[in-house]
Amino acid sequence: MSARAWQRMLSGRRLDLLDPSPLDVELVDIAHGLARVARWNGQTDGEHAFSVAQHSLVVEEIFRRQNNCSPEDCQMALLHDAAEYVIGDMISPFKAVVGGGYKTVEARLESAIHLRFGLPAITAPELKDRIKKADQIAAYFEATLLAGFSLPEARKFFGQPRGITREMIPIVPVPAMEAQRLFAARFAEIEAERATIGVVS
């Protein structure tokens, strides 16, 4: 009997991990899953886990504040960790141990997610770098405010944020259902902006 390589989603979709189809990707599944995946392996302060859904909102907020970006760019920033609704949030040290297999699965899922929502299958290197910078700033604030890192330690691993303060970002952990709602709502806002631009052009 061959090993099962698909996951059944609450929407009823069956997503093949080895060959994911955009047709099996649903925003409701992404929002639900990311809201229940904890950043930092759950090693954060607060009554609730700091979810990948909430992290994604923080990254998109930082990205938007630092860049003159299109709605499409913002959507790609919001979805930068979307593959984790299937494969979970693996901390960087463990990714280094696991090696390339994880990255291959992650890249396939990311491409399927992008195509599902009419985005480029592969993020352009320059855009990827800008999103990564926002991601590093988010990680700095998460590390120091939630995960117990000292300021010098966080600066060593993530760099010193410039132009972004704690007051600018939604860093207080919220319940999973609220994170799910906020993520889905922000996605819908960006999609509405993309649709408006499409009509105008």
Image (cartoon, grey):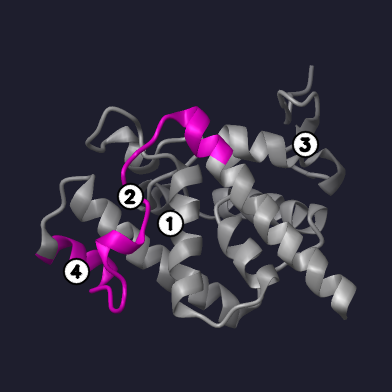
In this rendering, the label closer to the viewer, 4 or 3: 4
Q: Residue at x 24, y 65 (%)?
A: 157
Numbered circle sitting on residue 78: none
- Residues under labels 4 and 3: Cα distance? 39 Å
- Residues under labels 4 and 2: Cα distance? 18 Å
Q: Amino acid at mark 1?
A: Val
Disc 1, disc 2: CB below 8 Å?
yes
Q: Amino acid at mark 4?
A: Arg
- Mark 1 lies on a secondary structure that is helix
Quickly name the residue at label 3. Answer: 16
Q: Amino acid at mark 2?
A: Ile
First in sequence: mark 1 or mark 2? Answer: 1
Image: 98 above or below 58: above
- Residues under labels 4 and 1: Cα distance? 18 Å
Quickly name the residue at label 1. Answer: 58
Mark 4 nearby-residue class (10 Å; few <14, some 14–19, many ≥20):
some
| Residue 155 drawn in magenta | yes
Q: Quadrant of the N terminus?
A: top right
Image: 160 above or below 154: below
Relative depth, front residue between 107 and 41: 41
- Mark 4 lies on a secondary structure that is helix
View extreme (top): residue: 1
Quickly name the residue at label 4. Answer: 155
Image: 144 above or below 161: above
First in sequence: mark 4 or mark 1? Answer: 1
- Residues under labels 2 and 3: Cα distance? 33 Å
Q: How far across and how far down the image is residue 134, in percent? A: 42, 69
Disc 4, disc 2: CB below 8 Å?
no
Residues drawn in magenta:
152-181
